[in-house]
Image (cartoon, rainbow, N blue to C red):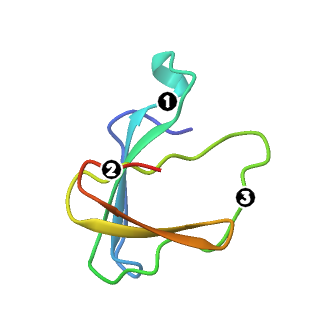
């Protein structure tokens, strides 16, 4: 079970994920802070049939592909 404050490091992918909100604390939304190194590939293409996914850039920039269309997001932007 995901627990608030737990961090998972993946040195191979160059990323770190920390759980911010989970069902454990009564949230209906799973919220994670993910930090990646520049040039990281990110997760493989995937779908969430019964949920949605939101990316909000806190620092730097990221390219997110949605329905085959790449979107560049910079600090303060989300998609």
Other residues around mark 3 within 10 Å, as few (<14) / some (14–19) / many (≥20): few
Query: Residue at 36% across / 43% down in the picture?
Result: 6
Residue 12 seen by the camera? yes
Gap between marks 2 and 1 measured at Cα: 23 Å
- From the image, tell me which residue sits under label 1: 22
Could you tell me if the residues under marks 2 and 1 are in contact, i.e. CB atoms within 8 Å?
Answer: no
* SS at circle 1: loop
Q: Position of residue 67 (x, y in %)?
A: 69, 66
* SS at circle 2: loop
Q: Position of residue 5 (x, y in %)?
A: 32, 37
* SS at circle 3: loop
In the shown orientation, is residue 44 left or right of residue 73? right
Q: Position of residue 39 (x, y in %)?
A: 33, 84
Query: Residue at 64% across / 42% down in the picture?
Result: 52
- From the image, tell me which residue sits under label 2: 77
Q: Position of residue 3 (x, y in %)?
A: 44, 35
- From the image, tell me which residue sits under label 3: 47
Front position in the image: 10 or 41: 41
């Amino acid at each position: 079970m995901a627990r608030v404050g737990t961090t998972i490091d993946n040195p191979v992918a160059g990323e770190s994920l920390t759980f911010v909100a989970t069902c454990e604390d009564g949230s209906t939304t799973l919220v994670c802070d993910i930090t990646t190194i520049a040039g990281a590939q990110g997760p493989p293409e995937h779908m969430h049939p019964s949920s949605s996914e939101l990316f909000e850039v806190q620092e730097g920039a990221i390219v997110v592909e949605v329905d085959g269309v790449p979107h560049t997001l910079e600090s303060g932007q989300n998609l």
